Image: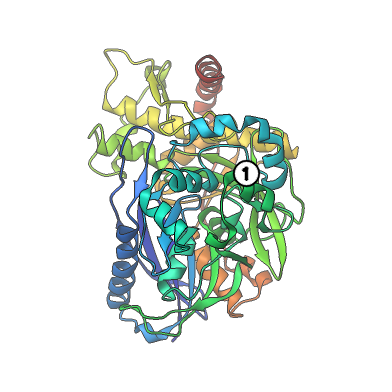
Amino acid sequence: MGYILSIDQGTTGTTSLLIDAKTFKLKGKLNQEFPQIFPRPGLVEHNLNDIWSTVEKTVEALLKKENVRAEDIVAIGITNQRETTCAFDKSGRPLANAIVWQDRRTADFCDSLKNQQDLIREKTGLPIDPYFSATKMKWLLENNDEVKRAAKSADLLFGTIDTFLLYKLTAGESHFTEGSNASRTLLMNLKTCQWDHELLDLFHIDKDTLPEIKDSFGKFGVTKGNSFLPDGIPITGILGDQQSALFGQAGHLAGDMKCTYGTGAFMLLNTGVEIKKSEYGLLSTVAFVDKGKAVYALEGSCYIAGAAVQWLRDNLNIIGDAAEVENLALEVKNLSEMEHILFLPYFTGMGSPYWKADAKAAILGLTRDSGRPHLARACLDGIALSINDLIEAMRKDTHLAIGELKVDGGATKNDLLLKIQASISNLKIIRPSVLETTGYGAALAAAVGDNLIAMEKIKDLWAMDVAFTPMTKWQDFYVKKTTQWKSVIAKLFL
């Protein structure tokens, strides 16, 4: 027996998965959360040692749980939270906490670059926003003493999470990334899929501190010096988490589309070899790079989706577990009770299609009759309404009708949320049989990179679990709610 190990390093935790290398069926998975660090409002950090510890522990425990020998792993795939920025030295020691993609500390610097917006968007497909990695690297270089010292002594390495994990897994022999992650840094030229000298100069980043950009599929290196894995296992596939989910949804052809409901929500449409420029606040990005050729995607990004439910759990303590939000929301029997209630989940600013870094979250329209169930239902409505903004932007940009949407991610276990989304957006929502599409996509990437499967065979592996269609009895309510949503956003933020 041979297995592919997939390491899915996410914003709130790490999931390790084992996939049969012949049947490509999921054998087992294990997740471990790690602490979120909030030094001040708007700042979000991760301890890289915490992240590495969750990789070690989940892999070790998963192998034991599934009674699989580490020697039976034939290839490793990595997928990761994308824009989160790591600084470490050449021994692999973290020099600072990672600055997370949600972090807004560079908002003022981004505002100062507005006169460079056209140049940056033309080269990278991205707007200027604290979301992306280059501004975080610049902040570390200017504000962190350890990073300054390492830069002065030529001992500084930058990377996104994939780069850090690869470096650790290979005992420092592989300082690489690939196109889907590099395309999120504001430093990679979309056309060449290489670091752009003009952008490096703009952000004052030394190219020698950055990883080499490789294809998404192929040999990135082999394991070495790890306590939980033997030496010599090839790492053969790396994709950023949203591109990995698209790949796991068999979305490798132009026209394929998915939306992942995780900590945030991210919609990707494969545009093939065409770099599609958005007029409605979406991003142009790399889906993957294969044999030196890039396949591109159009992306809409909501910073908060499942994280809004976590906020109800951790900050308001109105639920004990994220899964409880569905039953609590179902206690609202009459939607007229929700007529004026809006939950705007902008805890870390607004992404697509508005790009307002300083936006804040809000709950509006509460009365004395409002209670825990109304907050739960409003939270789900707010997630679906913000994702509907992505769907509408995608429809306008592509001139496609978009009558159905494949979805994945942990929040899609919530049937009520998907019924709400179908009703608001007037489309069929399709949930696959494998919900762990991000980790599954990384395993497929590793399989392609190790020649265990041909790209065109991936479609045969995808299967539907259930489809959700608009609820007729809700549609009048959500037509009014959508109008109310747009009006409030225009007044508060635009």
Residue 339 drawn at (x, y percent): 43, 17
Q: Residue furthest front?
A: 152
Q: How many marks can you see?
A: 1
| Residue appearing at x 41%, y 53% in the figure | 147
Q: Amino acid at mark 1?
A: Leu
Q: Quadrant of residue 362?
A: top left
The 10 Å Cα crowd at callout 1, few under 14, some 14 to 19, many 20 or more, is some
Q: Nearer the viewer, residue 42 or 419?
A: 42
Q: Quadrant of the N terminus?
A: bottom left
Residue 272 drawn at (x, y percent): 73, 56
| Residue appearing at x 22%, y 41% in the figure | 320
Residue 202 drawn at (x, y percent): 62, 44
Q: Is residue 183 visible?
A: yes
| Residue appearing at x 42%, y 59% in the figure | 150
Q: Is residue 436 visible?
A: no
The residue pinned by badge 1 equals: 202
The figure's colour scheme reads rainbow
Q: Is residue 253 above or below residue 100?
A: below
Residue 216 drawn at (x, y percent): 60, 66
Q: Quadrant of the C terminus?
A: top right
Q: Nearer the viewer, residue 480 or 81?
A: 81
Q: Nearer the viewer, residue 160 or 242?
A: 160
Q: Nearer the viewer, residue 383 or 81?
A: 81
Under circle 1, the secondary element is helix
Question: Residue 13 vs residue 125: left or right?
Answer: left
Question: Residue 225 vs residue 470: left or right?
Answer: left
